[in-house]
Amino acid sequence: MIFGFLRKNLEIKAVAVAFIMSWREGRNRADQQTARLAGFRDGLYCSLGMRRDALFEICDALACRPERVHMLAELCLEPECRRGHGGVYDAVNSGEIVIGRLRRAVDAVPLRPWDDGRIRLACDVSNWLRPDAETSPERLFCHVYARGKGNAQMIPGWPYSWIAVLEPGRTSWTLPLDTVRLGPEDDATEVTAAQVRDAVARLTAAGHWKPSRGL
């Protein structure tokens, strides 16, 4: 026997090796998550056109602000936004978003399948109520439930049709996949059906669908 080790030393070395392995695995997972986030941010940045830098800073400020945003000028107080309130309003009014590129960036985000291997999509209409915006174009009367039976109201606003990916398990988290504003001439059922078909095609092209997995 060339080398001899005490049992206590072996236990210490085993613990040290296990710690190093778990640390490396955790670091690898963190590196993968960082790479995914960096990839999405790159896709988001490339989906912006005019006023790209300002719009990107606005997105960072929205994501990092802990409270609800009541007005655009509040985003100027966040360290992620280096623009004054004039630059923020100019970016929103004159900026450009390439919707196709933005959708591809969202489609590239990894999706968690359910226990049966499927990805579940949910459809719903969410209203952005604008009762006082009389000069805003294409407002519709949005159905809003009020407290009490039979107290539903119709309030002017913009209805949006949403497609979201449901997270598995008992959670309320969802991944918004697509949204379309409904206009006065649109049929909500037809718009939703077209959204679902387009979303399935995009998820398939992004590699989320496999022969053993359904949607």
Image (cartoon, helix red, strand yellow):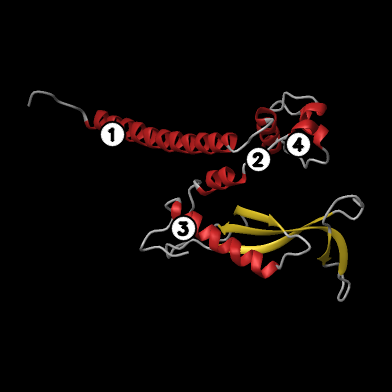
Residue type at mark 3? Pro
Q: Earlier in the sequence, mark 4 or mark 2?
A: 4
Which circle's residue, 2 or 3, is located before the other in the chain?
A: 2
48 left or right, relative to 203: right
- Say above or below: 138 vs 105: below
Which residue is farthest bottom?
Answer: 150
Which x, y percent locates residue 173? 61, 54
Mark 3–mark 1 distance (CA, rounded to whole Å): 36 Å
Q: How far is the residue under mark 4 from the one under mark 2?
A: 10 Å
Q: Earlier in the sequence, mark 2 or mark 1?
A: 1
Q: Nearer the viewer, mark 2 or mark 3?
A: 2
Q: Residue at x 48, y 55 (%)?
A: 203
List x then y, in percent, for residue 199.
Answer: 54, 58
Q: Which mark is residue 113?
A: 3
CA distance separating discs 2 and 1: 54 Å
Q: Residues within 10 Å of mark 3 (few under 14, many from 20)?
A: some
Instruction: Relative to 120, say whether 206 is above or below.
Output: above
What SS does tag 4 mark? helix
**Displayed quadrant of residue 3:** top left
Disc ID at residue 78: none
Q: Earlier in the sequence, mark 3 or mark 1?
A: 1
Residue drawn 64% across the image and 34% down it: 49
Which comes sooner in the sequence, label 3 or label 4?
A: 4
Q: Amino acid at mark 1?
A: Ala
Q: Are marks 3 and 4 in contact (CB under 8 Å)?
A: no
Q: Which residue is mark 1?
A: 14
Q: First in sequence, mark 1 or 4: give its number.
A: 1
| Relative side of 121 to 89, left or right | left
Q: Marks 3 and 1: CB-CB under 8 Å?
A: no
